[in-house]
Image (spheres, helix red, strand yellow):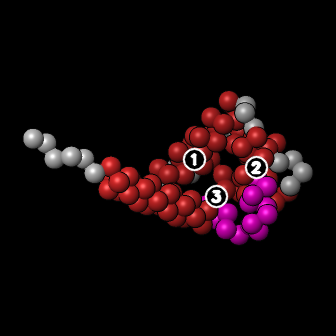
Amino acid sequence: MRKPRNYDEDLKALTAKARQLKARKQSQLGELVEATSADKLTIEELAGALLSIAAITDPARREAWRKRGAAFFSGERAEQASGPRTGDNARSAAPHDQHAASPGPATGAA
C-alpha cells in the first residue's frame, strides 16, 4: 500500500517556497534599482515614474523599453540597441518631470 500523503507538510513546503521566491524577487528588484542608478532618485520620484510607466499601454513604446532593457542586461550600450528614439520615448513618458527625462538621453549617449 501507498503511504498516505501529508497535505499539511506539502502546504508548509509550498508556502516556504513562495516566501523564498517573493524575497528573491524583492532583492532582485532592489539590485535592479541600484544597477540602473535609480537609487539616486527619491522614493517619491521613483514611485511616480513607475506609476507613469505602468499606465502607458502603447505597444511601440513598451517594445522600445523592452529592447533597451534587453540591451542593458546583455551589456550593450542603450544607444546601439534602441537608437535615438529611446530618449524621445523617455521624454514623452514624463514630460513634466525633467529629472525622469534627463537620464534617458544621458544614458544613451554614454
Q: Nearer the viewer, mark 2 or mark 3?
A: 2
Going from the N terminus, do you reach mark 3 or mark 1 first?
1
**Could you tell me how far apart the alpha carbons at marks 2 and 3 are, in whole angstroms?**
26 Å
Label 2: which secondary element: helix
| Residue at point 73%, 45% (across, down) | 53
Q: Position of residue 43 (x, y in %)?
A: 75, 66
**Could you tell me how far apart the alpha carbons at marks 1 and 2 are, in whole angstroms?**
18 Å
On screen, residue 105 versus residue 7, left or right, reads: right
Span highlighted in magenta in the image: 36-49
| Residue at point 79%, 55% (across, down) | 48
Q: Nearer the viewer, mark 1 or mark 2?
A: 2
Q: Is residue 81 magenta?
A: no
Label 1: which secondary element: helix
Q: Are marks 2 and 3 in contact (CB under 8 Å)?
A: no
Q: Residue furthest right?
A: 96
The prevailing secondary structure element of the residues shown in magenta is helix
Q: Position of residue 24 (x, y in %)?
A: 47, 61
Query: Please, what is the three-letter code of the amino acid marked with disc 2?
Result: Leu
**Could you tell me if residue 32 is visible in this image?**
no
Residue identified by numbered label 2: 51
Q: Residues within 10 Å of mark 3 (few under 14, many from 20)?
A: few
| Residue at point 58%, 64% (across, down) | 30
On screen, residue 91 versus residue 25, left or right, reads: right
Going from the N terminus, do you reach mark 2 or mark 3 first?
2
Residue identified by numbered label 1: 69
- Quarter of the picture containing the C terminus is bottom right
Q: Nearer the viewer, residue 65 or 1?
A: 1
Residue identified by numbered label 3: 110
Q: Are marks 3 and 1 in contact (CB under 8 Å)?
A: no
Going from the N terminus, do you reach mark 1 or mark 2 first?
2
Q: Are marks 1 and 2 in contact (CB under 8 Å)?
A: no
Q: Which quarter of the picture shows residue 1?
A: top left
